[in-house]
Image (tube, helix red, strand yellow):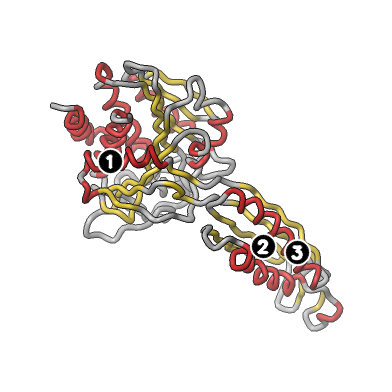
Amino acid sequence: MDMLEQIRSIAKELLPEIISIRRHLHAHPELSFKEEATSAYIQNILSNFGIEFSKGWAGHGIVAHIQGKSDRLIALRADMDALPILEANEVSYKSNHDGIMHACGHDVHMAGLIGAILILERLKSHLPHSFRFIFQPGEEKLPGGASLMIQEGALNDPMPHCIIGQHVFPELPAGKVGIRSGLYMASADEIYITVTGKGGHGAMPHQCTDAILSASQLIVAMQQLVARHCPPAIPSVLSFGKINSVGGATNIIPNEVKIEGTFRTMDEDWRAQAHALIERIAMSTCAAYGTAATVRIEKGYPCLFNNETLTQGIHQNMVRYLGKENVVDLDIRMTSEDFAFYSHVVPACFYRLGTAKKGEINSGVHTDTFDIDESALEIAMGLMAWLAYSMD
């Protein structure tokens, strides 16, 4: 039996165990940077199988290692944190923690990586190179666990040849995967603007400096950022999701209005220019209406770049493992992921794992009814193990 068939066979054999692990993780979710019990559970599994690891990375992160025939190193990553969502699914593995749910599939990512480790450990005497396995906290919360693990040296001594990550994708049925070479996901920054004026009675606006009117004009003026300043070839989105006055009633013009939004793009140079323009537009628009603006931009995750040479090779090996009909080309996404930090340090590839149940209505990630077809776990572990093994 060749290596591909061995990996497939072991993945099939391990599926019930990995489903059980995934269900335990799903039932015991923990929020970003609070993944203490999750980390302890994974450490126990690794210890039981004699896998070498270190703990305490960025809080509760784990870095495990399997030594192959050479020191050439391939890194695989899974994220660990859950979301502040009250689960609505009525399943045996429903979250035991009210208001916390693995609604973004990180339970699947961890279980898949554990499965890949167990496959590679069983084939240890045949491995052409070595492997580093990163269980990362805090993907859902700035500054992102990836950035902290990089700062703490999780990619050092030695630097891996490349890093691979996968993410659930309920838009694809279980049995399929999706991939894209080059720029794939956007950077994401949080925009906080405070507009300050002079409040008063709504019946006497001439005695006020209207922060509500000024904030409204500011939001409209901000639309020129993408429409008239962004190079047309660069995908960019500026959206405001929250506007709130301090105090107020139907007949009160407030002193202050707060606006919150998100800016996303796929070019780091333009990203920096846009930050300066956001501040300039806010200041000048408010000045025209006699109010003042203060702007705070919380810089988030960078754009995610899938190394073209690496991704081309991974695509070919996906086809070998799954068949051409089960490997889908993806479009760019304006969502963001802190795996992007890794892609700015070493060659990286981040792909999508189909998880939809065939013939059923499937909820998207970050919803209270998100769930998966658990047969996808066989591919989650088997494909990741195969991709890591077959890396040139």
Say above or below: 114 vs 142.
above
Q: CA distance from mark 2 to mark 1?
A: 46 Å
Q: Secondary structure at mark 1?
A: helix
Residue 73 in sight from this viewpoint: yes
**Left or right of residue 12: residue 221:** right
**Left or right of residue 140: residue 247:** right
Please state which amino acid type lies under the numbered disc 2: Ile
What is the crowding at mark 1: few (fewer than 14 residues within 10 Å), some, or many (at least 20)?
some
Q: Are marks 2 and 1 in contact (CB under 8 Å)?
A: no
Residue 23 in sight from this viewpoint: no
Per the image, the residue denoted by label 3 is: 195
Instruction: Tell me residue 275's x, y (percent).
Output: 67, 54
Which residue lies at the image location 58% right of the left edge and 43% below the top edge?
142
Per the image, the residue denoted by label 1 is: 316
Q: Earlier in the sequence, mark 2 or mark 3?
A: 3
Q: Secondary structure at mark 3?
A: strand
Q: Are marks 2 and 3 in contact (CB under 8 Å)?
A: yes
What is the crowding at mark 2: few (fewer than 14 residues within 10 Å), some, or many (at least 20)?
many
Q: CA distance from mark 2 to mark 3?
A: 8 Å
Q: Which mark is residue 259?
A: 2
Q: Earlier in the sequence, mark 3 or mark 1?
A: 3
Q: Secondary structure at mark 2?
A: strand
- Of all residues, the one furthest to the right in this rendering is 207
